Amino acid sequence: MKMEKNGNSIVVDSNTLSYNDRVIFDWSVDPVAFIGRGEEEVEMYRGNFKIEDYLITRIPLDKVDYTEADDQIKLSLSCGDSKAALVIIAKFDDLGRLVLALEGDDKSYNRLWLRLAANSDEKVYGCGEQLSHFNLRGKHFPLWSSEPGVGRNKETLTTFWADVKDKAGGNYYTTNYPEATFVSTEKYYCHTNSYAYADFDFRNDHFHELQYWEIPDSLVFETAPTYKKLIEKLTGLLGRQPQLPEWSDNGFLLGIQGGTDYVYNTGKKLIDKGVKLAGFWCQDWEGIRMTSFGKRLFWNWEWNGELYPELDKKIHEWKENENLRFMTYINPYVAIDAKMYPEADAKGYFAKNKDGGTYQVDFGEFNCGVVDFTNPEAFDWFKNVIKTELIDFGCDGWMADFGEYLPTDVVLHDGTDPMVAHNKWPMLWAKCNYDAVQESGKWGEIVYFMRAGATGSQKYCPLIWAGDQSVNWSLDDGLASTIPAALSVGMSGCGLSHSDIGGYTSLHGNIRTKELFMRWAEMGAFLPFMRSHEGNRPAENFQVFDDDEAIDHLAICTNVFTDLTDYRRAIVKENSEKGTPVQRPLFMEYEDDQHAYDIQYQYLFGPDVMVAPVHEEGKSEWDVYLPEDTWVHLWTGKEFKGGNYTVASPIGQTPVFYRKGSEYAELFESITSKYK
Amino acid sequence: MKMEKNGNSIVVDSNTLSYNDRVIFDWSVDPVAFIGRGEEEVEMYRGNFKIEDYLITRIPLDKVDYTEADDQIKLSLSCGDSKAALVIIAKFDDLGRLVLALEGDDKSYNRLWLRLAANSDEKVYGCGEQLSHFNLRGKHFPLWSSEPGVGRNKETLTTFWADVKDKAGGNYYTTNYPEATFVSTEKYYCHTNSYAYADFDFRNDHFHELQYWEIPDSLVFETAPTYKKLIEKLTGLLGRQPQLPEWSDNGFLLGIQGGTDYVYNTGKKLIDKGVKLAGFWCQDWEGIRMTSFGKRLFWNWEWNGELYPELDKKIHEWKENENLRFMTYINPYVAIDAKMYPEADAKGYFAKNKDGGTYQVDFGEFNCGVVDFTNPEAFDWFKNVIKTELIDFGCDGWMADFGEYLPTDVVLHDGTDPMVAHNKWPMLWAKCNYDAVQESGKWGEIVYFMRAGATGSQKYCPLIWAGDQSVNWSLDDGLASTIPAALSVGMSGCGLSHSDIGGYTSLHGNIRTKELFMRWAEMGAFLPFMRSHEGNRPAENFQVFDDDEAIDHLAICTNVFTDLTDYRRAIVKENSEKGTPVQRPLFMEYEDDQHAYDIQYQYLFGPDVMVAPVHEEGKSEWDVYLPEDTWVHLWTGKEFKGGNYTVASPIGQTPVFYRKGSEYAELFESITSKYK
């Protein structure tokens, strides 16, 4: 049987269900669904999760019946003679998307595995932000919001020590931003309407096995002739990030802490030495506390006038007189020793424990309440904290940190199972910020950035940041990891991302070097947003403002960044209009280049600029791959055809090329002529 | 319905199957069996296995029908309406044991899970040799023969480096000798007639879940009023180890290498300084090769006259003139550059690869053929190698090493699936040695010892050794680990075990110290067999024969060992007659003492001697637990009642106590009077 709508087709025959000529389910040999029951054990330690499933049953639904009625095809899946354990309704939505609505009869089943037809050459991208693998084929990916991990590779000593000391080593799949959404090289996307724990297994030649710890509401599919069109459709479904405020084009956001005068004077010093400064990003506006991890913030979400005297006046003076913006920091937890805690606690704004008391989460030597976003009053209260303490105070942006720590034994106001609320939390947290900005009428002026994400981040989070990299050169947790992170989150519909220039986590012997900072800053010039971080232990790690040579180098990087403004604005606009990511995988522009599909440590910055960041120490040359085209090396003006090249890459000149045929070629040439 | 035989009963009602009043199956709430299909991936690297199962189905057999006929009760287990997927025939064997014979209809099922009823207080012991946990409750235990691992604890650096460099770190369950046999504190044993991969899960309060990667032939149960009686019954089923040859009571077996004169002269030096020497154990009688792991043996199973000139004469002279025995070494692999390889290969005695060629196994920088014990001609050939090259040559014993490396992609002569043959291999290797000694009529004169084991080792392996400990103090892989190893293998029916005095593996920074050797030797005096090992890197590690103080210390230990001969002979005899292990858990003699069930780093040496080996560095006192009784401290004669004590434990005096009421009290007193 066949249904058609707006040029789309759903066909079901005795063995398969197809959508626009892609086979989605094929039950000719093996079942396409398994249903069962599991009992999970979840341990959280400071945002790091140990999750084990004791699988009780996994029943193959190998009998498929189908009937057509009312513009939908109903597949009834069962095991042998018993009644249907799962019903899949295949239908079009109003735009002709394929919707597979799922219904499970028996509530005792809490596990579902669906097998989507695949072929052995197919590649798969997305699943939110993935830091170790861009092409997801060959691995399985548990989808669960968590700390990303320190090291993220069980074969490194950093990971070993992080595991042993803090249960914090992570793994290739640990991420702040998982999402049950992917794009296949069969030119379809598959999005699941579910926030439950999931594990997408792309290891098999002939199927993708999608595991869910619930029976999801539905899966949605669309197809398109190109990846750009596909992402446009995906972001049509999930939402698109707005454009960045124009002031972010002014240059570098200096991540710095320490008080009004110190911050300002340091910024002035940079400006005086030629750095294009857009403003300050000061986490510690609300005060600090010391822990063994390093200097930590106080987590009381209002201006600390002792540490930042006169900030209430300066924030306006700096903006008006010097066009310098002030960004700050907030997260959705409140320290139990914070000023705002008692009243909020009394009003029941924090999530509860099973005994009815306030659930306290350990964030590393201090405890916090969890703002319960499922309680509309709590949501509004915290939204108003953002509006009054941040927006009305004059902040032009902030890091909206965390969101991944919702414990799974918490009791929520609306009764949601925390196993389902957990992955949704980053979306609720994003929406709280979004509503605050929206209600303040400040889009176009304000930007906040988040590491945690979920379905909905596309709409509610205007800027992703890649989380807390280690201050090292490791592939899984250093500078390099931010590239697959941006590419995968871009394939998931969030095309604006960036990272802490210099990295963040200095633990277990990792200390940021000057070279690491400089290489990261070089890449930063080719990101949509250019911001540094002092790291978790500022005093022990390299800081740019302490080093004249590094300031000179940063000055150049920030000048390149501002020189690129017209081009960057165009690609940022394209992202806001069509979802086309600012950092793109090579294959998005060169679909016929098979090699392009396997590259995860280079990216296209918009359609015309190829960036191959140097992500190893002590390199003066670097291997790059160029798809078939005419490329101009940005730092020398030398032309290249497609192919593999080893190019000079002294400090200051991470390999960057532009397409000779770009409509912005003149802009790029002007940069070349400045620096060659 | 109820059946009875020899005082035993099988009762089946609508919810349960019971045997001698123990509920074995209880299907009142949850299924007692699940059947399914999995696809395993097995990677072997030098005896270390990475095994992952992709579980396709796990179907609950929640419908149970039962019928009685012909002295058996037939349980038909099915899922819903379909026909029985599993039939369990409950019956008595001729001795009144409960036999549960299993029959699966559908050959596509290759996974079975059985849930035996359990209670939350119950404890479980056995499963072959387990080095990290004696009481198995609270963990699951994959049962698969492998290298035991270097470090065996993912939180240690030794394990980390062993994993990263050699995939060899192991885990708490990795063992040379797994067995699908356990003893419950409900005073039953459960033995499964299966060599397939299994995973016994003792984590649940109300059931033990036994997973098998086949449908096993049968499970066998017996009950008894005491643990001794239970082990007597278990060894009645599985076989018992013979007594040790009397010459092993003569003292210490010096593990040494280096050639005829060097070996002899070193032994003489020890004898001259008061060491009671029973003989030499020389691995390198067949020559050596150097690898990065250290000095390795050549693996050509005949005397190397270059390294051991005149050994053919000396071996007899030493025995006749000085009562010094010569033990040597063999394993069931043949190096491809060995003299005996070409002919054996030409005759097809080695296991094949899928292309029909000889399968070569990498043992660490050299390759070997695997003697195919499923080929009767190959079995006989290798048995005759043992008979002619070892026994006829005059050896009085040997290490029968390895047995765990059968690759799972090998092609065997009799067509057995290597996934099933793998765990059986150690038994076949043991039997090859057994038959050689048996046919030579040499029981009582010869002893060989093995680390690899399987069901059948009880009969075919006269002496276990605990494998390759690291030369350190770690609980999971050092001196301490040999105690739960001996206790668990004893509960599995092998009551004669011992370990390399001084440990073996010196890798990743572990170097044997004098103190470690001395502490190990102190324990060695209270083992059935007292033997040292030079280790894998003799030159870098402490060797007793290089140190006068250590020789003096060893002299005392060996004198204690020989002083204990009458007592030791009695308990070794008891093991051969009833299977009562020589090293016993405390609860075996003190069943009412609940604390005794949790002690795994002390043991009873026979009924009357409590040994609490010092297994940490730099200790001059040690905590011991004594069950309610009157105990005499062996080194001082001081009396103790039951309780916890901290006792002095200077070097030379690892805490040992004897029961004042022992019939060997006089013997023990004589030792006390010598050393106090």
Image (cartoon, coloured by chain):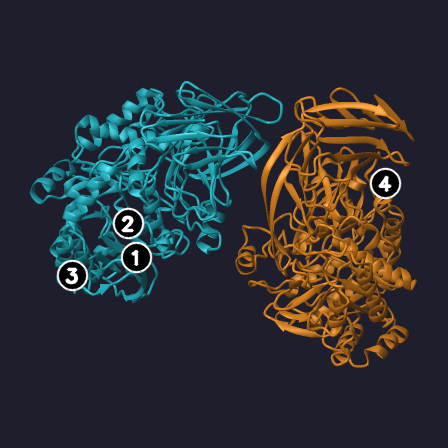
Chain colours: A orange, B cyan
Q: Which residue type does callout 3 highlight?
A: Thr
Count residues near mark 1 (Cα–Cα under 10 Å), then give few for <14, some for 14-19, many for 20+: many
CA gap, disc 3 and disc 1: 21 Å
- Please tell me which residue lies in front, B511 or B52: B52
Between discs 3 and 1, the one toward the N terminus: 1
Q: Disc 3 sits on a residue from what chain?
A: B
* Helix, strand or loop under label 2: helix
Q: Disc 4 sits on a residue from what chain?
A: A
| Label 4 and label 2 in one chain | no
In the rendered view of the protein, which quadrant contains the C terminus of chain B? bottom left
Between discs 3 and 2, the one toward the N terminus: 2
**Callout in the foreground (4, 1):** 1
* Image point (81%, 43%), residue name: A630
| Residue that carries the numbered disc 4 in the rendered image | A233
Between discs 2 and 1, the one toward the N terminus: 2
Label for residue A175? none
Counting from the top left corner in percent of width and height, residue B586 is at 31, 51
| Residue that carries the numbered disc 1 in the rendered image | B627
Tell whether A40 sits left or right of B653. right
In the rendered view of the protein, which quadrant contains the N terminus of chain B? top left
Q: Which residue type does callout 2 highlight?
A: Glu
Label for residue B589? 2
Quarter holding residue B22:
top left
Q: Are the two marked residues, 2 and 1, in contact with CB atoms closer than 8 angstroms?
A: yes
